[in-house]
Image (cartoon, rainbow, N blue to C red):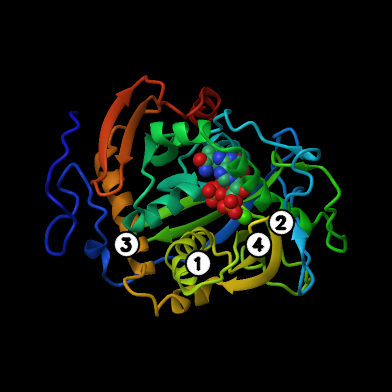
């Protein structure tokens, strides 16, 4: 099937929005009622240890410990001598999620534990981070993306492919930028304990191989979704609500000193924070505001449900409904084009800012991402 992008800009009311071979990201097209988004339900979790080994349990879960009022946390501490960085040249694709699916298959199939080999009761499997990119696309002006899609036994699997531009950026990172990427993890170390009554250990070695991920199930319009996202920590109060409502997302951001900085924070950063946590139903973000030297000088909690009110005073600001409607229409577009059920076929959806989403089809190519161990076990 040819990749034949059209100039036509769909979707719009009153016509089939997915009749063309491309999809517009223009925000005006998605300003309609908020689509149905079911409360995400945690169906499981998994952990990756200091050597990036998978465990089908919550052993890497951490507990939030609130820092002092005027904290003065030095985020540069330990960068040179107590930091083990995950090898990001290893592309893990969906592998950890697929392992989780195999270990928990009976929870997911329509017939439950009675049939181990039947199909999953799910339309889409992906990482939360990929969905975040879809939600923010109508407002993104800098970075494009490529998403590989494979239909296998009725379920559509979505896995990101690194763009050329992203690979170049990664190779050309400055030493300052490398160090600033460490700051976010360091803030986690200052605010998270390994046990419910424990204390954070800022003197320990920081290892970014370690991760705790939640797996949630939900529905967006008529799309049944299963996705996983990394969770920083949880509320340690024994009376806290069940997951995902007890989870807390941690962020660092430059301190805000001018009205211009505040406006940019609302228009760009809060969009990303909202999209990332709204998807899995994580109710709050705890932000550490740091100075130019990497010292956290203030800590503030942002309830996700209040973010859309906070931004209402900004001129031509982002709207949650546009994000969700675009995502929903994107998933409909994927269902429409990715028709061949075959683990060795990849539909590659590509997008650059100010362009439409287009696609190409690849058979037995390096884009294939469903591993043999997954295909075989799902088929047997
Ligand atoms: O392209 C990706 N996002 C991939 C992610 C490709 C292959 C694997 N992964 C997995 C890893 O297993 C990781 O544990 O990503 C998991 C996190 O997935 P996510 O929650 O869907 O990703 P996202 O929402 O983009 O990021 C959440 C956190 C980040 O925290 P901040 O506060 O900076 O948003 O996960 C970390 C990062 O700390 N993170 C990653 N960790 C490992 N590999 C990656 C990555 N590629 N991207 C972000
Ligand atoms: Ca975080």
Closer to us: mark 3 or mark 4? 4
Mark 2 and mark 3 in contact? Answer it, CB < 8 Å. Answer: no
In the picture, the disc for residue 290 is 4
Which residue position holds label 3?
325
In the picture, the disc for residue 187 is 2
- The residue that appears at 26% across and 47% down in the rendered structure is 333
Q: Earlier in the sequence, mark 3 or mark 1?
A: 1
In the picture, the disc for residue 2 is none
Closer to us: mark 3 or mark 1? 3
In the drawing, does residue 281 fall left or right of residue 335?
Answer: right
From the top left corner, tell me how far across and down residue 128 is, in percent.
50, 51
Query: Circle 4 sits in a helix, a strand or a loop, which is it?
Result: strand
Q: Earlier in the sequence, mark 3 or mark 4?
A: 4
Mark 1 residue crowding within 10 angstroms, few (<14) / some (14–19) / many (20+): some
Q: Earlier in the sequence, mark 1 or mark 2?
A: 1
On the rendered image, what quadrant is the N terminus found in?
Answer: top left
- The residue that appears at 23% across and 46% down in the rendered structure is 356
Which residue position holds label 1?
39
Q: Earlier in the sequence, mark 2 or mark 3?
A: 2
Closer to us: mark 1 or mark 2? 2
């Amino acid at each position: 099937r040819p990749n034949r992008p059209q100039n036509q800009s769909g979707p719009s009311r009153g016509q089939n929005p997915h009749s063309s071979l491309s999809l517009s990201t223009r925000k005006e097209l998605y300003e309609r009622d908020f689509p149905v988004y079911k409360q995400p339900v945690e169906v499981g979790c998994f952990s990756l240890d200091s050597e990036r080994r998978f465990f089908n349990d919550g052993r890497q879960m951490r507990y939030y410990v609130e820092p002092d009022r005027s904290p003065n946390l030095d985020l540069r501490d330990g960068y040179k001598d107590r930091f083990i960085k995950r090898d990001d040249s290893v592309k893990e694709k969906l592998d950890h999620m697929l392992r989780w699916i195999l270990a928990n298959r009976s929870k997911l199939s329509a017939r439950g534990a009675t049939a181990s080999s039947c199909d999953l009761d799910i339309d889409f499997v992906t990482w939360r981070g990929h969905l975040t990119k879809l939600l923010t696309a109508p407002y993104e002006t800098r970075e494009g993306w490529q998403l590989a899609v494979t239909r296998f036994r009725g379920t559509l699997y979505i896995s990101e492919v690194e763009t050329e531009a992203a690979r170049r950026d990664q190779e050309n990172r400055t030493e300052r930028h490398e160090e600033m990427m460490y700051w976010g993890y360091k803030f986690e170390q200052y605010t998270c304990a390994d046990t419910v009554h424990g204390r954070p250990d800022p003197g320990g070695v920081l290892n970014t191989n370690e991760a705790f991920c939640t797996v949630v199930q939900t529905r967006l319009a008529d799309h049944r979704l299963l996705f996983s996202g990394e969770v920083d920590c949880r509320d340690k109060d024994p009376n806290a609500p069940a997951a995902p409502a007890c989870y807390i997302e941690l962020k660092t951001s430059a301190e805000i000193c001018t009205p211009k900085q505040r406006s940019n924070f609302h228009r760009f950063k809060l969009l990303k924070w909202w999209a990332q946590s709204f998807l899995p139903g994580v109710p709050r973000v705890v932000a550490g505001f740091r100075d130019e030297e990497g010292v956290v000088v203030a800590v503030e909690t942002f309830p996700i449900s209040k973010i859309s009110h906070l931004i209402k005073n900004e001129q031509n600001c982002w709207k949650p409904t546009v994000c969700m409607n675009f995502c929903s229409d994107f998933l409909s577009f994927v269902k429409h084009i990715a028709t061949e059920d075959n683990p060795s076929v990849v539909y590659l959806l590509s997008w650059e800012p100010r362009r439409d989403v287009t696609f190409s089809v690849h058979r037995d190519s390096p884009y294939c991402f469903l591993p043999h161990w997954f295909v075989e076990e799902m088929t047997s």
